[in-house]
Image (spheres, rainbow, N blue to C red):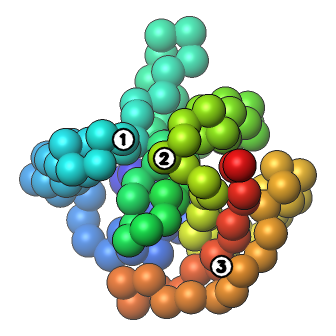
Amino acid sequence: MSDPRVARHMPLLTFEWDDVAATKFIATKEDYWRRDGLGHWAILDNDKYVGWGGFQKEGDEWDYGLVLKPNSFGLGTHISKRAIEFAIADKRIPFVTFLIPPSRTNLSALTRLGARFVDEIDYCGAKFLKYRLETE
């Protein structure tokens, strides 16, 4: 997350990404797993770490996010399709939301998945484009 190519699409990353921040981040994500029974995964490609992503409960909604290392950006559509298949099979997830930073301008893969634009929202002081995908 310290790579500028990644950070430029993460408007909530307003602090230095160091060992302390990483440790706190991991603890927070593990807390979501304990609280909700689901959360983010480490994403591997041929046993090599390429990023992280998955589902995080935001109120009554399951939000999907994916953050890849720059040399793995091309894997996003494939990984997201697999994650959506997971969501469709999981009865806890009647729909998935996506909070997309406005810096992401090519949203064709998202619409090909079937997601529809909901609204422009403020989340923790940053602007995002909210999309929704029905999974039932």
The residue labelled by disc 2 is 92
Q: Is residue 69 left or right of residue 37?
A: right
Q: How far, Cα to Cα, is label 3 from label 2? A: 24 Å
Question: Which mark is in front, 2 or 1?
Answer: 2
Q: Around disc 2, counting alpha carbons within 10 Å, would you say few (fewer than 14), some (14 to 19), or many (20 or more)?
A: few
- Secondary structure under tag 3 reads strand
Task: Give the crowd class for mark 1: few <14, some 14-19, many >=20 residues within 10 Å.
Answer: some
- Report crowding for label 3: few under 14, some 14 to 19, many 20 or more residues within 10 A (C-alpha): some
> What amino acid does circle 2 point to?
Arg
Residue 53 position within the rendered picture, expressed as x and y whole percent measured from the top left: 48, 43
Question: Which residue carries the number 1 mark?
Answer: 38
How many marks are shown on the rendered structure?
3
Residue 132 in sight from this viewpoint: yes
Under mark 1, the amino acid is Leu
Q: Which mark is residue 129?
A: 3
Of residue 44 and residue 33, the one placed in the foreground of this image is 33
Which residue: 39% across, 59% down? 57
Looking at the image, which residue is at 82% across and 49% down?
Answer: 113
Label pair 2/1, CB-CB below 8 angstroms: yes
Q: Residue at x 57, y 18 (%)?
A: 45
69 or 120: nearer the viewer: 120
Query: Could you tell which of marks 3 and 2 lies nearer the N-terminus?
Result: 2
Q: Indicate the secondary structure of the residue bearing disc 1.
A: loop
The answer to whether residue 19 is visible is no
Above-or-below relation of 62 to 126: above
